Image (cartoon, helix red, strand yellow):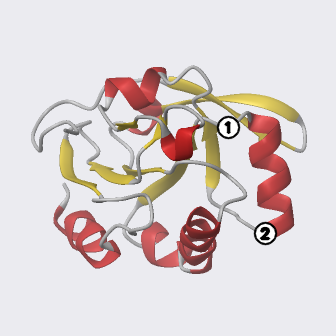
Amino acid sequence: MPLKIGTSAPDFTLKTKTASGLEDVKLSDNFGKRNTILLFFPLAFTGVCTQEMCDVSGGISSYESLNAAVYGISVDSPFAQEAWAQQEKIIVKLLSDLNKTVTKAYDVVFPGLAGIGDTAARAAVVIDKQGKIVHVEQTPTPKDLPDFEAVKAALAKAK
């Protein structure tokens, strides 16, 4: 079960690939400044994950208008994530949790996906500016998408 609403979000630093190279993204850099959405997803280059990240990319302004940073987190390498983002025109910042440390910290591990190994489950976590979890949803299966209207509603109420 993912972490509970009202708990402090575990801080982390993960890598993202940009045109200038690998960069660190630290969750707590947002604290006191803006809300954060963490979108855990199983694997790049798969159908539902591509749909989710493309849909969120297409509507990124609705999250930004609610003062939120949006991060997609998977167990893929930052290099695979970058290739996928370029191919699919994904503008959500993708973070690599190759060692599954953040996936485990947020308790959203999906064991044995398609018999190939553990990945992140599909989950949405909304964190307010104070670093508290204000919304969390892990979907029943990797084929199901989070309720993005509930994500936006949680953002609208976040402090």
Mark 1: few/some/many CA within 10 Å (<14, 14-19, 20+): many
Query: Disc 2 vs disc 1: Cβ atoms closer than 8 Å?
Result: no
Q: Nearer the viewer, residue 84 or 35?
A: 84
Q: Position of residue 99 (x, y in %)?
A: 57, 19
Q: Quadrant of residue 102?
A: top left
- Horizontal side of 80 relative to 73 (left or right) equals right
Report the amino acid beneath label 2: Glu
Above or below: residue 89 compared with residue 22:
below
Q: Nearer the viewer, residue 5 or 115?
A: 115
Count of residue discs: 2
Above or below: residue 102 compared with residue 92:
above
Mark 2 and mark 1: span between their CA atoms? Answer: 16 Å
Q: Quadrant of the C terminus?
A: bottom left
Q: Nearer the viewer, residue 97 or 34?
A: 97
- SS at mark 2? helix
- Horizontal side of 155 relative to 27 (left or right) equals left
Above or below: residue 152 compared with residue 136:
below
Q: Identify the residue at image location x=66%, y=61%.
A: 46
Report the amino acid beneath label 1: Asp
Q: Identify the residue at image location x=53%, y=23%.
A: 13
Q: Nearer the viewer, residue 50 or 89?
A: 50
In the rendered structure, find residue 76 and report the number of the disc placed on it.
1
In the rendered structure, find residue 88 and report the number of the disc placed on it.
2
Q: Position of residue 118 (x, y in %)?
A: 49, 32
